[in-house]
Amino acid sequence: TTDITVVPKKVESFDISAYKYLIFWVKGARGGEKMEFLARDTHALNYSPQVKYKLADATTEWQKITIPLSEFSSKVDLTKLDNIGIAFGKDVGNMTGDTIYLDDFVFTNNP
């Protein structure tokens, strides 16, 4: 018998409730690469994201991505955020070897 229950390691959370947006820059090597924003708070029962937010496909030029935090504030506690991520693998529709460049992540009140 194997216990496959995964209990998240408790990490120090970050309070982002004073901010309205997460902004970052992205570009793809060939264009059309798919992405999804993921978030989880300290109340999560496992390592799975509590929020999945589809992002626009990447282009071959740098583009600014603005995520309004209000889009998922009812699903994740913004006062106790402990994980954010960008999914860009096969599970969101990309091919092996696809390349996505990410830069300059910031929480802000100015879009």
Image (spheres, rainbow, N blue to C red):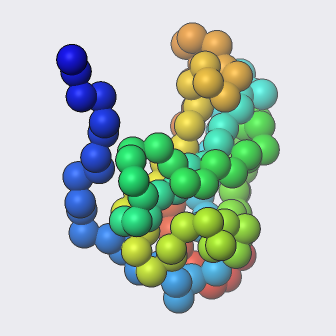
Residue at figure coordinates x 67%, y 28% from the top left: 92
Observer-nearest of 24 and 51: 51
Rendered position, 64 above or below 106:
above
Rendered position, 52 above or below 22:
above
**Residue 35, x across and y down, in percent:** 66, 38
Q: Of all residues shown, which one is farthest toward the top?
A: 96
Q: Where's the N terminus, which quadrant?
A: top left
Residue at figure coordinates x 58%, y 31% from the top left: 88
Residue at figure coordinates x 40%, y 65% from the top left: 43
**Residue 72, x across and y down, in percent:** 66, 66
Taking the image as drawn, is residue 21 in sight?
A: no
Q: Where's the C terminus, which quadrant?
A: bottom right
Q: Of all residues shown, which one is farthest toward the front?
A: 1
Observer-nearest of 75 and 65: 75
Rendered position, 3 above or below 76:
above
Number of marks present in the image shown: 0
Taking the image as drawn, is residue 35 in sight?
A: yes
Is residue 52 rendered to the left or right of residue 55?
left
Q: Of all residues shown, which one is farthest toward the bottom?
A: 18
Q: Quadrant of residue 28?
A: top right
Residue at figure coordinates x 56%, y 37% from the top left: 87
**Residue 109, x across and y down, in percent:** 63, 84
Is residue 13 rendered to the left or right of residue 67?
left
Is residue 5 rendered to the left or right of residue 68?
left
**Residue 30, x across and y down, in percent:** 71, 22
